[in-house]
Image (spheres, rainbow, N blue to C red):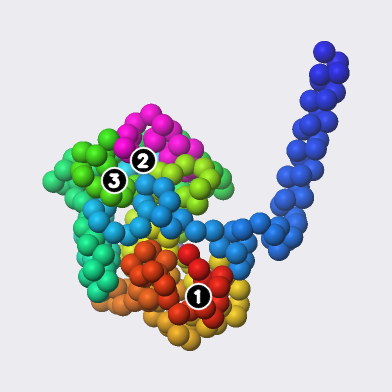
Amino acid sequence: MKNYIRSGSLISLILSISLILSIYLPVSSYAAPGDLGEPRSSYDLGYAGELKGKVVILSLFVNTPTTRWDVPSMHETLPVLKGATDYLLLASEKYDAGVSFEYDWSKNRDLRYRIGVRYEADDPDFTDKADETIGELVSSRIDYKAILQENGADSLFAILYFKDEGRSYAITYDGEDIPEETVIMFSDSDASTYAHEILHVFGAHDLYEDAEYTADVVKYIKKKYPKEIMLKPEVKNKKIVSEISPLTAYHVGWIDSVEDIKKYPQLER
Ligand SMILES: [Zn+2]
């Protein structure tokens, strides 16, 4: 018993030391994929593979202890999602990707869920807690395979809506963790942000500084594709003015190759 306790304390000590080290070591000390210049790709992986064919989007409205979604406020998200998906459709037509979206929960109630959590959007551990929420949902409440089959769809992902301000992000699947990809949205997100995050689950990469690519690559992208949506999502007069460059078209599977990868192989999908 004593020995057991001792080795237990040793293990926790080692764990605490490695935790401290992982917090204070600069990112560059890890040479694993996913570091700057070594992006991890979610292309053709998970329930949102390539951006082709029929895509089903589930809308999951999350109530926190202080924020509640009522029906009118839930409806306010639909035109924004329509703006984003119409934009993606129009862009995909140039590449004959045959994309269609099924997301309108006002017509198909099976696409809408309401859930409650015990944390707020500004919780310091928000991302971990949101991960946990998604884990619970996909293991107990949502049958992804059945939804794909019922809708005759090729891809499926969920949007988790928080009725608060915050910085949206996408949880993509690169072969580790869960293949049920998710976008986290806040009520102040605009259509270009929706489109940006949706592109992520199909394999698009962040092209701005200090995200996935080294400074020389970012400089090249900024010069060649200044209006690229993965560089900067932008809306003017309620219209998305950012563009989907051939590079992002390649990252989501609309084209098989792009000349940029010859110049910078780290851009390969
Ligand atoms: Zn992004």
Callout 3 environment at 10 Å: few (<14), some (14 to 19), or many (20+)?
many
- Residue at mark 1: 261
- Left or right: 75 in relation to 165: left
**Please, what is the three-letter code of the amino acid marked with disc 2?**
Asn
Q: Earlier in the sequence, mark 1 or mark 2?
A: 2
Image quadrant where one finds the N terminus:
top right
Foreground label between 1 and 3: 1
Q: Nearest the camera: 8 or 143? A: 143
Range drawn in magenta: 130-145
- Left or right: 42 in relation to 90: right
- Point out residue 96 in the picture as x, y percentages from the top left corner: 23, 68
Q: Earlier in the sequence, mark 1 or mark 3?
A: 3
- Left or right: 194 in relation to 215: left
Residue 77 location, quadrant: bottom left
**Please, what is the three-letter code of the amino acid marked with disc 1?**
Ile
Tell me the distance, in whole angstroms, between the alpha carbons under discs 2 and 3: 16 Å
Residue for point 71% across, 63% down: 28
**Please, what is the three-letter code of the amino acid marked with disc 3?**
Leu
- Residue at mark 3: 58
Q: Is residue 219 above or below residue 23?
A: below
- Residue at mark 2: 63
Q: Earlier in the sequence, mark 2 or mark 3?
A: 3
Q: Nearest the camera: 92 or 109? A: 92
Identity of the residue furthest to the top in this view? 1
Residue 192 location, quadrant: bottom left
How would you classify the magenta stretch by its main secondary structure? Answer: helix
- Disc 1 and disc 2 in contact, CB within 8 angstroms: no
